[in-house]
Image (tube, helix red, strand yellow):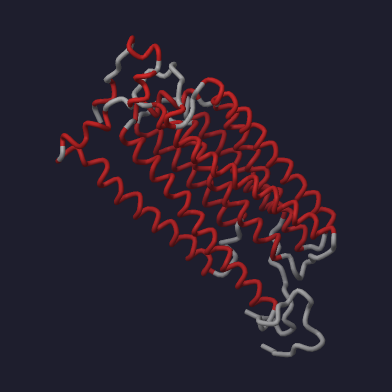
Amino acid sequence: MSTNHSGTHPAHLQHHFSDVEQQRESAKLGMWFFLLTEVLTFGGLFCAYAIYRSWYPEMFSIAHRELNVTMGTINTVVLITSSLTMALAIRSMQLNNKGMTQIMLFLTILLAATFMVIKYFEYTHKIHVGQLPGKYYFFEGIDANNPHIFFSIYFAMTGLHGIHVLIGIGVIAWLMIRTSKNEFSSEYYTPIEMTGLFWHLVDLIWIFLFPLFYLIG
Amino acid sequence: MSSESGKHYPHVLPLSTYFSVAGALLALTAITVWMSNFHFGEWNLIVAMAVAVTKAILVALIFMHLLYDNKMYLTVFLSSLIFLSVFITFTLYDTMRRGDIYDEVSQPIQKRAALYETLKKDSTHTKSSEVHH
């Protein structure tokens, strides 16, 4: 549109973009390409899951009973609610309601932390009884062949997902600092929007992990 | 694409949209947990995945704004899913049908891993349950 570098352009507009809208759409396209690589990263693990579940259908069915469905369900509710609060944080900033954005971002962090605390209790129990990946497995209560494979995949997938939740907590905390410095407005909230996309993807992955691990028939 | 002033006018969804999507997601979670109490064999997985896909579509279209945004983003996202399904489908064509041709190759997979030999109680219950596919 204009190449006018002097004067009226907003402070958040980088000089190599012609206008705010182009800058925003470029950022979003970049973010979606990043999410594409995320889908493929987790995809490798989903593929491993599919291979071993097709090889050991009965072992998966028996081993999954060791997982705590109540904790898994609570974590699903927690993560869905955190997705809602993240979406509402973006909406509040679209309406220039910075106080509400801060509250929603804080609630998102709180829910993410709750998710990790529940995960911590699940993990410590499994580590204690020996339901561990690969050669570290020493649990004897599963009457099926090679249940260590189930727990290898369980720890790999929920572990990588958990790392994403921790990274999300860090990024959302950074958003709260930037919001408190008044760096965002209804004109410019791209970092919040991009973090929202990341956070919803973390939720999306859990939506599949939950039935695949906790709810095998 | 660009407005005259170069300003950004956000596309704001009504609060009710967000709350009804979250409500639907929670209801679908309740349904999928409840359904897991029944045993339909193969159908358990199919129903669980159908519910999960429905939830994923809601999150992607509304929370991630794919329904309202430039369809370029939806294309990028769907292309990742297309590649993922090719990846998984072709891998399973191999791994699920290996035993049909090479009987000796499929054998080691069906044996118990060596690590179980070192478990104390192991000798008392030697298992061979997972021989069938």
Identify the residue at the far front of this view. Answer: B118
- Residue A85 against residue B3 in the figure, above or below: above
- Residue B47 against residue A24 in the figure, above or below: above
Q: Quadrant of the N terminus of chain A?
A: bottom right
From the top left corner, tell me how far across and down residue B85 is, in percent: 37, 53
Left or right, A81 with respect to A106, comes to left
Identify the residue at the far top of this view. Answer: B124
At 50% from the left and 59% from the top, the residue drawn is A36
Quadrant hosting residue A119 = top right
Left or right, A186 with respect to A134, comes to right
Quadrant hosting residue A3 = bottom right
Q: Quadrant of the C terminus of chain A?
A: top left
- Residue B127 against residue B41 in the figure, above or below: above
From the top left corner, tell me how far across and down residue A154 is, in percent: 48, 35
At 64% from the left and 77% from the top, the residue drawn is A22
From the top left corner, tell me how far across and down residue B118 is, in percent: 38, 19
From the top left corner, tell me how far across and down residue B130 is, in percent: 28, 25
Quadrant hosting residue A152 = top left
Q: How many marks?
A: 0
Query: Of residues B88 and B128, which is closer to you in this image?
Result: B128
- Residue B1 against residue A128 in the figure, above or below: below
Left or right, A167 with respect to B32, comes to right
Left or right, A81 with respect to A40, comes to right
Query: Of residues B12 and B97, which is closer to you in this image?
Result: B97
At 78% from the left and 54% from the top, the residue drawn is A176
